[in-house]
Amino acid sequence: MKRSPGRAGAAGGAGSPGGLYAAPSLFWLTVFFLAPLAIIVAYSFLTPGPRGGVEWKPTLDAYRAIANPSFARVTLNTIVVAIGATAVTMLIAVPCGYYMARSSRQTLLLMLVMIPFWTNFLIRIYAWIAILGNEGFLNDLLIATGLARQSVRFLYNRGAVMLVLVYTYLPYAILPLYSTIDKFDFSLLEAARDLGASKLGAINKVLLPNIKGGILTAFLFTFIPIFGAYAVPLLVGGTDSYMLGNLIADELTKSRDWPLASAISLVITLVTTMGVLLLLRANGTSVLGGSGDGEKPVPEASSAAAYGAQAIGGSR
C-alpha cells in the first residue's frame, strides 16, 4: 500500500528534514528544562549539607517536612491568592479584550496595554509602594479630602498582594483575549439577537464558547506565574500573604535546606501541571494539541443559530 507523504515524513524520524528542524528546540528543552528538572528531583531525595548544598545520602526527609501543618497553611494561602488574583484578572481582561476588538483605536489601546512592559518589574512594584504606603499618594489624598483622619494601612496584607498581582499580570491576560476576540465574527451576535436572544445571552452562548481557547490561554498565562510569585508578596505582603515562592527562597538562602526547597518546587510544578491538564481536558483539548475526542469543533454560525432558535422557543 502506498504511504501518504505526511506519513512518510513522520516515519523518517530524526533523519527527516522535520527531525533536523526540531533538533534545536529539543536541545533547548533538554538543557534548560529537562536537565534542571532532573537535578531538582534528585536533590529532593538527598540529605541537606551542614552549610548548604546536599550530601549524597538518599532520604525522604524533605517530603516528610512537607507534611508539616505550617507548609499546608502556606500552600493553602498560595492557592487562595493565585485563584483570587487570577479570577479578578480574568473579570477585567475579558471586557477589556472585547472592547479593544470592537474599538476603532486598536493601535492606541494596544500601545497602552504594552506600556507596562517598557518598565522594569521591580520599579512597578515600588511605584505601588509609593502609592499605597502610609505616607503615599493615596493616603495623602484621603487625608487632604477629609475622607480619613490618619493614614490607612493599605500595604503589607493579602489585599495589597492581590492588587499588585492583578496589575502586573493583566496585560498577559488581555493580549491573548484580544487576539482571539478580534478574529470572532461579530455578525453572529447580531444574528443571535435577531433570532430573539438577549444581548447578555448572546455573549454567553455565542461569543464565550467560541473564544474559550483565548480564555484558557489567558488563565494559564496568569495563574501559573502568580502561583509561583516571589517578589510581589515579599515587597508588599505581610504575614498573611506568605507564599510558596517565598518559602522556597527562605529555604535556599536562610535555612540552606536545598532538598526541601527542591521538594517544594516539585509540588508547585505538579500542582500547576495538573491544573493545566485538567483545564485542557475540560476544554476538550489533547495535551499534544487538537480535540481530545477527535470531533470537529462546532461552527460559530451553528452555535448562533442554535442559541437563537433556543431563545425563540423559550420565549413562546
Image: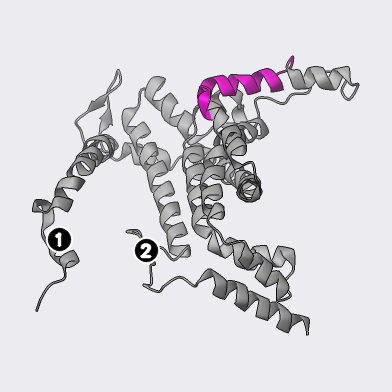
Residue 11 seen in this snapshot: yes
Whole-percent x, y for residue 93 in the image: 61, 46
Q: Quadrant of residue 164?
A: top right
Q: In which quarter of the image is residue 133?
A: top right
Q: Residue furthest top?
A: 135
Q: Is residue 286 left or right of residue 173?
A: left
**Along the viewing direction, whichever of 196 and 13 lies nearer the viewer:** 196
Whole-percent x, y for residue 304 in the image: 61, 72
Q: Give the range drawn in magenta.
A: 117-135
Q: Is residue 267 left or right of residue 235?
A: left
Circle 2: is it few (<14), some (14-19), or many (20+) Cα within 10 Å? few
Whole-percent x, y for residue 157 in the image: 66, 30
Q: In which quarter of the image is residue 161?
A: top right
Please report whichever mark, 1 or 2, sits nearer to the chain's N-terminal start. 1
- Quarter of the picture containing the C terminus is bottom right
What amino acid type should be assigned to the residue bearing mark 2? Gly
Q: Is residue 155 left or right of residue 31?
A: right
> How many marks on residues?
2
Q: Main secondary structure of the magenta part?
A: helix
**Along the viewing direction, whichever of 273 and 176 lies nearer the viewer:** 176
SS at badge 1: helix
At horizontal 17% and vertical 44% (from top left) the residue drawn is 23
What amino acid type should be assigned to the residue bearing mark 1? Gly
- C-alpha span from label 1 to label 2: 20 Å
Whole-percent x, y for residue 245 in the image: 46, 32
In this rendering, the answer to whether 28 lies above or below 11 is above
**Along the viewing direction, whichever of 231 and 254 lies nearer the viewer:** 231
Closer to the camera: disc 1 or disc 2?
1
Residue position for label 2: 290
Residue position for label 1: 9
